[in-house]
Amino acid sequence: MAWLNRLFPRRRRYEDLAVSINEHLAERTDELIDEGMSKADAEQQARREFGNVCLIQQRSREAWQWSTLESILADVRFALRQLIKSPGFTATAVVTLALGIAINATMFSMVSAFLMGHVPARDPEGVVVLSSVNPDASFQADINGVSAANYLLWKQNTRMFPEMAASSEFRTASLSTPGEQTEAVAYAAVSANYFSTLGVAPQLGRGFVAGEDEPGHDHVVILSHALWERRFGSIPSVIGRTVRLNHEDYVIAGVMPQDFRMLGFPAKLWTPLTLTAADRAPQARSSRNLQVFARIAPGVTLKEVRAQMNVVAEQAQRDFPATENRWGASARTMGDFLVYNFGIARALAIIMTVVAFVLLIACANVAGLLLTRAVGRQKELAVRMALGASRVRVVRQLLTEGLMIALMGGAGGVFLTYFGIGLVRAGLTFNEMTSVVPVSLDRNVLLFAAAISIVSALLSSLAPALKASRTAINADLKNETRGGTAGRSHGRLRAALVGSQIAMALFLLIGSGQLIRAVYLLDHQKLGFAHDHLLTAGVVLDQARYPDALKQKQFVHSLTAQLERISRVESVAVVSDLPATGPGSVPVHIKGRTEARANERHTATDMVASPEYFSVAGVPILRGRGFTGADQPGTPRVAVVSQEFVRRYLPSQDAMGKEIQLDIQGGSPESCEIIGIAADVKNFSEDPRVEPAVYESLEQRPVAGFSVMVRSGTDPATLSDFLRSTVTRLDPELPLLRVMSMDAVIDSQRNGNPLFEKLLATFAVLALILSAIGIYGLIAYSVGQRTQEIGIRMALGAKADDISRMVLREGLKVAVIGSVIGFALAIPLPKVFDAMFSGVVFGAPGVYPVVLAVMLIVAVGATFGPAYRAARVDPSQALRNE
Amino acid sequence: MGKNPDRRDLFSGALDLMILHSLQVKPMHGYALAKHIKQASDDLLQIEEGSLYPALQRLLREGLLESEAGVSAKGRPTRIYRLTGAGMRQLEREVSSFEKMFTGITRVLAVAALQEG
């Protein structure tokens, strides 16, 4: 860093140099005067003999400089001085870019956290997730869970998979510790080698050891860091302590580190997974609920694993046609699996595309500003080139200015991103799995911000710089140009820039308009039941104290009776799955109707409901009857089916009295008779499709896990305390899951949709504002350039109206051409979206004219100011100009 | 960090030599130095006077010269350049290498002249 040390004496050196040169010139001048020249002639002659004073001074100084760096520093210093000289321009450009960069970096923070987030495994590239391929599913069919039998079979291939572990996720346990309230905790049951397969060790205590996944040895538990912190106050002495889990004693064996967090899997604690003989039985093959993680042997590729999985699946189809028919098997690397399973990539891709467009529009604005400025600086550039600056040097200088603007914009952008990420984090709290993902201003985001700052610098300043450097020195120095001729080619470039801005903005508006409309329609679709004034809560009765149907029914009866005694409660029902919350489908056989082909199996969602369900939920029975208290285990099994069921499977037949049989996992199939037809209810509140549904009576087929629905005349939230206390009175150790109104349940199923809508709308509006600024800048500049021309026109008799119309027309021309291009680009959008989002209806044609009208109104509005000013040009003033 | 080599054109070695040699005689200020070189060469060497200054700065930087405040013959403030010890040694080296080179060139030219004749 010697050059740094030289910085200080250097100023003295430069002074010495200047003194020497001045004295040199003065002495020579004196001499020439002595020889009889006039003073002026002598001065000129002395300078001529000396040469280019500036250049020589520059060369002399360079002796002291580290030339490349110094000249860059000089460029930077000069650029900063130039920018400080025009603060209005600088602020506009910097703020525009800062906004564009901040939006991109903020959205990228989600990409970084969700898609590039860490995989909780050592050497994650070597870990694959093995899945079943569901022939009947339309969504993420290739990451279906795996049956215990298949897991144990696949595990034998130790040549390919030296280690294989399984977990059963999405379980809920009641957790109680002495002196504290019982709570429901999400947990997973995992094989004893689960943590060692992933290659992660507990931060405290130990992992599971071999044998702990055998019945009788399995009452050990490992806590997540978050649970340990919240519930156990981060005390290390929890190891070895006993907790009550599902009303049984478990010993805490370990605590996982904070960063052991699996995207999309909410487990807060882990217990050993015990696989019994029943789990391995052939009929249990249809129970596919294990996630299988395997470490692949060194040298084995993912392709080979997939080929092997296909072979295995085909073998299984031959061996177990009853359960494995058409089912496949697949493999993904763990990182890939987590991202795919979480299903956020598509939404992020759309958002990143949108913000990239916003940045492009911002860059176009800055490029427009720089072009305008370049016109004003033509003379300065001409002088510099005349003084010997090379073209490369001038371009470099202008690019440096662009880079300075972009870097300031980038710094401002990072500053704004810090707050933007705060907003995003607040917006991501819509569910537990997104709120735990650490979205932050991490290294990826900073690198991304730096990269896009540089790209923006190039995008916004390269064209203006090249253009400006192609200056005709003579013409510019003389500046004999009058009127608008000098700016014409600049004007064309600017108009093209603004036109493409408008095209991009229109494209964005139409695209986001359609997405927002589709999402809005989805969020506000008629669900087919009355979801207002309903309080709901989940209950899972444990095996230990509610081992049989009788005990379970007793609990339901006393709960219902006690709740109905509360004055504000109108009615109470119990159902296995709340309506429109996506109950699973099971195969169904209809007596007397042979299945047409193997791949056209009949399936229906399967729900078990108490007799009051249909009236409490407000689902009308269209034919026949609902369940009554008379439908008991001793009487014939009955079922109610949905309209869609009849429409799809029993068209042109009388459905009433038909016998059907549901293939329920792990249960023995029993025939039941259709006694009623209920109106359709949407299968899932965020899906427009209707699935065939079958309801069975809770009296005839009790279940351990169910939801309570309480209808009241008042705000359902006010009843939640009554609900809690009633349950506590019945069973102090029974936790209630998610006590919330039905509307809140539906709201929570909207997931990220409101955030997605808000983001899209914000960015589209921002694009609109930026292009409005662009068109305003273009027309204002053009009016400024043409002041003289306008003056002449008015002097020749043009009226104020003619002038403003002329200016408006100029703005409209650009807006219309840009709009037409944007419009044409947007036409195939509905098809693209249809392909991306199956089942959602796009192609709202109403969006097109609305957006076009908005665009043109904004364009006219932005042109109006300059047009008004143009019409008020005073001809005598304008002609005297210059 | 050295200077850009193509800035030091073919002539600069010779110019450096002349500057060092002139200043060995006595310390001088810029204008006097320019005049001295011009006169000593009997106006045979036409140099742009100004090109002296980059060379002076380079020699200053290399520590071959030093400068101090002084006044010109006409009493104007200026800077006087003087040879340092290192400059003296450099001059000796340059003179001997220059002489060797010059002898070499002369011989080559003599041979060429013989062949022509």
Image (cartoon, grey):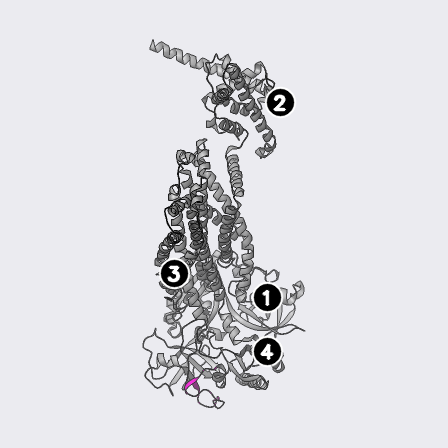
State the separation of the CA atoms marked 1 and 4.
37 Å
Circles 4 and 2 on the same subunit: no
Circles 1 and 4 on the same subunit: yes
Read off the residue under disc 1.
A222
Label 2, secondary structure: give it: strand
Looking at the image, which is closer to me, A313 or A351?
A: A351
Can residue A509 be seen here? Answer: yes
State the separation of the CA atoms marked 4 and 2.
93 Å
Q: State yes or no: discs 4 and 2 in contact (Cβ < 8 Å).
A: no
Read off the residue under disc 3.
A852
For residue B69, which numbered disc appears in the image? 2
Q: Chain of mark 2?
A: B
Instruction: Determine the residue located farthest toward the top in the rendered image.
Output: B117
The amino acid type, in three-letter code, at marker 4 is Thr
Q: Which of the two labelled residues, at mark 3 and mark 4, occupies the earlier sequence position? A: 4
Can residue A705 be seen here? Answer: no
Label 3, secondary structure: give it: helix
For label 3, count other residues whose C-alpha is less than 10 Å away and answer few (under 14), some (14-19) or many (20+).
Answer: many
What segment carries the magenta color? A618-639
